[in-house]
Amino acid sequence: QVQLVESGGGLVQAGGSLRLSCATSGTIDNINTMGWYRQAPGKQREFLASISRGGIKNYAVSVSGRFTISRDNAKTTVYLQMNSLKPQDTAVYYCNANVGDLAVWGQGTLVTVSS
């Protein structure tokens, strides 16, 4: 099994930056793609960015140019660098891993952007 633990959330002023981390453990060799999602109060969870086993990255239009997904060389930690944050970026941010046909989620980390 794969376990995901997010960290790095917090309170930041508009225009600021944060870097989220997603640490993986378990049978990580079976992970195909990892990604970041977020869910704001009263809204559906939305896709932000993903990185494939081969390193191909995809971004949602809403965050392209502001957010960057990356991972360490050991492929055990995935990061989301968030710049130029806006109050509307306030949400719980979740890490996701696709393991075969299964989707594994972390517990989420709260990001609050003040105006």
Image (cartoon, rainbow, N blue to C red):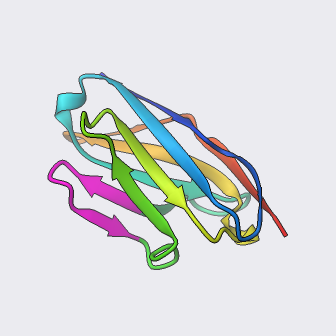
Residue 30 located within the stretch drawn in magenta: no
Range of the magenta residues? 49-59
- The residue positioned 55% from the left and 50% from the top of the image is 19
Position of the C terminus, as image quadrant, is: bottom right
- The residue positioned 66% from the left and 65% from the top of the image is 89
**Of residues 32 and 56, the one drawn nearer to the viewer in this rendering:** 56
- The residue positioned 18% from the left and 48% from the top of the image is 53
Position of the N terminus, as image quadrant, is: top left
How many badges with numbers are in the image? Answer: 0
| Quarter of the rendering containing residue 39 | bottom right
Residue 57 located within the stretch drawn in magenta: yes
- The relative height of residue 52 versus residue 14 in the rendered view (above or below) is above
Q: Residue furthest left?
A: 54
**Of residues 92 and 56, the one drawn nearer to the viewer in this rendering:** 56
- The relative height of residue 72 versus residue 43 in the rendered view (above or below) is above
Prevailing secondary structure class for the magenta stretch in the rendered image: strand
- The residue positioned 63% from the left and 41% from the top of the image is 109
Q: Whole-percent x and y of residue 46? A: 51, 63
Q: Whole-percent x and y of residue 7? A: 58, 36
Q: Whole-percent x and y of residue 78? A: 38, 43
- The relative height of residue 1 versus residue 31 in the rendered view (above or below) is above
Q: Whole-percent x and y of residue 69? A: 39, 57
Q: Is residue 104 left or right of residue 40?
A: left
Q: Is residue 96 left or right of residue 81?
A: left
**Of residues 40 and 115, the one drawn nearer to the viewer in this rendering:** 115
- The relative height of residue 42 versus residue 24 in the rendered view (above or below) is below
| Quarter of the rendering containing residue 82 | bottom right
Q: Is residue 12 left or right of residue 30?
A: right
Q: Residue furthest right?
A: 115
